[in-house]
Image (cartoon, grey):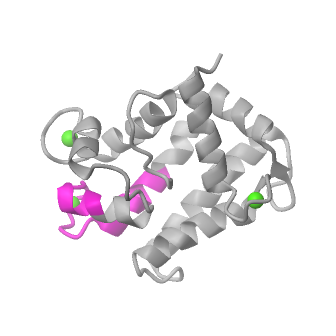
Amino acid sequence: MFTSLQLDRAQQRFDTWDVNGDGQIDRSDWQAEAQQILKALRVPSVSPAGRALTEAYLGMWSFFAGEAGIDEEDGSLNLDQFNHIAHEHIVEDSSSGFGRVVRPVIEAMVELVDTDGDHQVNPPEFKTWLDAINASNIDPAEAFRQIDTDGDGQLSVDELVQAVRAYHMGDIDVPLLGH
Ligand SMILES: [Ca+2]
Ligand SMILES: [Ca+2]
Ligand SMILES: [Ca+2]
């Protein structure tokens, strides 16, 4: 069963991904979410980094569509279907296929904000990340501490992938893939 916080997170996640607000999630919503992030970062969507993010987002959509047994071009998911898949794959099983489709999104985001090129995210780079997903109500320093589980002052791809799951579990308060 979902806890109420997990349900709340799933609802927030759904509302975020339902970019055009029609109560259904489809491919265009995921594309729009990636476009919004790229626009906020002033990165052209046709650049290699822009393409990588868009493809990674569409990879997440392919996963959800596949799990729901719907056509990824024409199909759409309602809230119940979305919750079911999220429950099965995000909350219950950390080694599931969802982890494998989240990782490319995290890697693409790290690439986009990693101004010093060390493939990790330092505090100023993390601030850029939060701004890009419009998470203005998040305390960047507190969020950083929650995600930096080894406390080395850098967010690794692994820590960030774990944080996506921890957010949906209700263990931490930081949405990393849009808000
Ligand atoms: Ca929609
Ligand atoms: Ca860096
Ligand atoms: Ca770390």
Residue 56 x/y as whole percent: 55, 59
Q: Reply yes or no: does residue 112 show up in magenta.
A: yes
Q: Reply yes or no: does residue 80 show up in magenta.
A: no
Residue 111 x/y as whole percent: 35, 64
Say which residue appears at 64% left-offset and 34% top-offset.
Answer: 86
Name the one closer to the observer, 53 or 42.
Answer: 42
Q: Relative to residue 171, is residue 9 depicted above or below?
A: below
Q: Give the side of residue 22 with respect to residue 164, left or right.
A: right
| Image quadrant assignment for residue 120 | bottom left
User: Can residue 157 be seen from the camera position used here?
Assistant: yes
Name the one closer to the observer, 172 or 65.
Answer: 172
Q: Quadrant of ligand 1?
A: bottom right
Q: Give the side of residue 174 with respect to residue 75, left or right.
A: left
User: Can residue 111 be seen from the camera position used here?
Assistant: no
Q: Give the side of residue 131 with respect to residue 104, left or right.
A: left
Say which residue appears at 76% left-offset and 47% top-offset.
Answer: 65
